Image (cartoon, grey):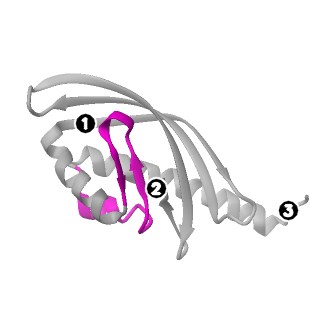
Amino acid sequence: MNMTIEARLKKIEALEQIRVLKANYCELCDAGYSADALTTLFTEDGVWDGGEMGLFAGREALHKFFTHMPNVMSFAIHHVTNSAVEVNDDATHARGRWYLMQTATLKESNEAVWLAAQYDDELVCVDDAWRFRR
């Protein structure tokens, strides 16, 4: 199917907006996990699934999780690489993948650690703004 230039441009703009969304998420985590700001990056029914760290669904649960994170990590720097984002043809849904290497300090033990993970995000465009759905 041939896409119009306008549709192609909308997809390209979505790709960049999603990359900025991910960068904002990482920056907010690294700046102390502002729960108020972080929860706005998710849909109302958004899910954060951190495997061993837990699964949190909905903004209230997300807010509690992010509020607690400074008690877990006193320092964190998210290094994300290898972004691969696929946007659907009407630029309303997307899937993003990033690799994470994170330096962090565990608050309780003051131990420096390295964390490695892969983000596999589902994203949606809500009111002209991209948000994490999962």
Q: What span is in magenta?
A: 33-57
Picture mark count = 3
Query: Which tag, 1 or 3, sits closer to the chain's start?
Result: 3
Q: Amino acid at mark 3?
A: Met
> Horizontally, is 117 left or right of 73 in the view?
right
Would you identify the image quadrant in which residue 116 lies?
Answer: top left
Q: Amino acid at mark 2?
A: Leu
Question: In this picture, is 60 found above or below 108?
Answer: below
Query: Which tag, 3 or 2, sits closer to the chain's start?
Result: 3
Q: Residue at x 8, y 31 (%)?
A: 108
Task: Residue 50: say if magenta.
Answer: yes
Query: Which tag, 2 or 1, sits closer to the chain's start?
Result: 2
The residue that mark 1 highlights is: 76
Q: Residue at x 90, y 60 (%)?
A: 2
Callout 2: few (<14), some (14-19), or many (20+) C-alpha neighbours within 10 Å? Answer: some
Residue 21 is tagged as 2
Question: In this picture, is 15 found above or below 51?
Answer: below
Task: Residue 40: say if magenta.
Answer: yes
Nearer to me, 4 or 64: 64
Residue located farthest toward the bottom when viewing the structure as drawn: 127
The x, y position of residue 54, in whole percent, is: 32, 42
Nearer to me, 127 or 45: 45
**Decide: marks 3, 2 in contact (CB < 8 A)?**
no
Label 3's element? loop
Q: Residue at x 52, y 50 (%)?
A: 19
Label 2's element? helix
> Horizontally, is 42 left or right of 92 in the view?
left
| Distance (Cα) linking label 1 and label 3 | 42 Å
